[in-house]
Image (spheres, helix red, strand yellow):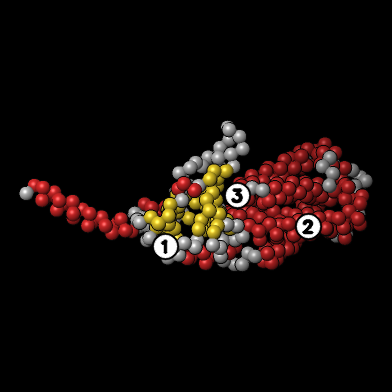
């Protein structure tokens, strides 16, 4: 009698677990297909796992994904999403094929120190039913559906257009070009001499230079918008090559207007502080600093866009922070130069630079931080 009762209990247990077994039926397991990559030396950490995902077989099944926190996932040529926390979700095979328009795609998971077993992919008969905790984790998936190549094409085209403008400026104004790009001029402060070359803002040579600098700065700003505010941009633009190019030119135009307004503001403040002859060297000293810093910014962006796309966001974050501190250092250098060149009270110079430079720059930086968050 005891044996019969035990057999009956075992039968009921098996019948109760049957739906769960069917629900979790694995059709294909990619566990043994993962390949490591990115480890350049014995002492460096692995930073990626890759696997070829078949989107042809079992078209009505589901692909179950598990990704660790702080990982960036590419599928084919697309940056698919970034997972802030451990992420578990399922997608139908036919839907993935329709979305990515490929039959086989290379899936790459980027994360510093990632190891075999940190990510799992399985084809299952039915989508897994996650518990409440897993459902919360799955909500942290941030999908990205833009093409890396679109951003690269836009960036290269914009850089070529800027280089063309620089070449024209060098051909038309070779002396001013040599003065404007020379980093040593930030130290010797030759603009503050009586023989300074730039004494008329609204001349074509000066405005041409300002336009080129704003195009460089605008390119950096648009890259920041794409990588930090993608969802916000996606609701307003298609974010293809044409829309990104138009956005870049529009931002460059806005920056040109703001630059002109800034110069007018500096001129007004200089007049109030009886420093009327110093608005030109003041303005162009910092403009030259912005131009040189933006050029290095573009070089860094070029390297990461073409070689380490997954690290572009970190590179942008570091570059923007570096730009902030370089500009602050430039204002401090400007204060020292003016203090040595002028017989003017130090607290008057400090008040002048605070009103003309520091306060507007800090307010703008705070606004950019708020928008970025």
Q: Residue at x 42, y 60 (%)?
A: 62
- Residue labelled with disc 1: 61
Task: State the residue position of label 2.
Answer: 160
Q: Residues within 10 Å of mark 1 (few under 14, many from 20)?
A: many
Q: Is residue 224 left or right of residue 194?
A: left
Gap between marks 2 and 1 measured at Cα: 47 Å
Image x and y of residue 223, in percent: 66, 55
Disc 3 from disc 2: Cα separation: 24 Å
Whichever of callouts 1 and 3 sits on the residue coming sooner in the sequence is: 1
Closer to viewer: mark 1 or mark 3: 1
Residue tagged 3: 310
Q: Residues within 10 Å of mark 2 (few under 14, many from 20)?
A: few
Say which label, 2 or 1, has the lower sequence index. Answer: 1
Secondary structure of residue under mark 2 = helix
Q: Is residue 106 visible?
A: yes
Tell me which numbered mark, 3 or 2, is placed earlier along the sequence. 2
Q: Nearer the viewer, residue 4 or 242?
A: 4
301 or 306: which is nearer to us? 306
Q: Residue at (89%, 53%) from the top-left corner? A: 170
| Label 3 secondary element | helix
Q: Nearer the viewer, mark 2 or mark 1?
A: 1
Say left or right for 27 vs 204.
left
Residue 47, quarter of picture = top right
């Amino acid at each position: 009698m005891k044996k019969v009762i035990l057999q009956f209990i075992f039968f009921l247990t098996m019948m109760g677990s049957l739906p769960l077994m069917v629900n979790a039926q694995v059709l294909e397991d990619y566990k043994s297909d993962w390949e490591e990559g990115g480890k350049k030396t014995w002492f460096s950490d692995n930073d990626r796992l890759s696997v070829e995902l078949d989107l042809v077989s079992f078209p009505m099944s589901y692909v179950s994904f598990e990704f660790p926190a702080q990982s960036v996932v590419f599928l084919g040529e697309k940056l698919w999403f970034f997972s802030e926390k451990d992420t578990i979700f399922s997608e139908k095979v036919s839907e993935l094929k329709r979305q990515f328009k490929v039959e086989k795609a290379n899936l790459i998971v980027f994360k510093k120190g990632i190891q075999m077993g940190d990510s799992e992919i399985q084809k299952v008969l039915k989508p897994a039913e996650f518990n409440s905790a897993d459902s919360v984790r799955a909500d942290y998936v941030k999908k990205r559906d833009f093409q890396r190549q679109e951003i690269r094409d836009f960036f290269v085209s914009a850089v070529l257009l800027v280089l063309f403008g620089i070449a024209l400026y060098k051909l038309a104004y070779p002396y001013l070009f040599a003065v404007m790009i020379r980093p040593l001029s930030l130290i010797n402060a030759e603009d503050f001499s009586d023989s300074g070359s730039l004494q008329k803002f609204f001349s074509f040579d000066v405005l041409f230079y300002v336009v080129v600098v704003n195009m460089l700065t605008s390119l950096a700003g648009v890259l920041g918008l794409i990588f930090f505010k993608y969802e916000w941009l996606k609701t307003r633009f298609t974010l293809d090559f044409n829309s990104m190019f138009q956005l870049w030119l529009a931002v460059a135009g806005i920056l040109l207007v703001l630059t002109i307004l800034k110069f007018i503001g500096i001129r007004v403040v200089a007049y109030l502080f009886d420093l009327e002859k110093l608005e030109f060297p003041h303005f162009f000293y910092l403009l030259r600093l912005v131009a040189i810093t933006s050029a290095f910014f573009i070089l860094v962006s070029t390297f990461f866009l073409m070689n380490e796309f997954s690290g572009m966001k970190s590179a942008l974050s570091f570059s923007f922070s570096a730009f902030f501190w370089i500009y602050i250092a430039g204002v401090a250098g400007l204060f020292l130069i003016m203090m040595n060149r002028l017989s003017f009270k130090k607290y008057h110079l400090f008040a002048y630079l605070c009103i003309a430079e520091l306060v507007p720059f800090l307010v703008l930086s705070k606004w950019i931080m708020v928008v970025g968050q």
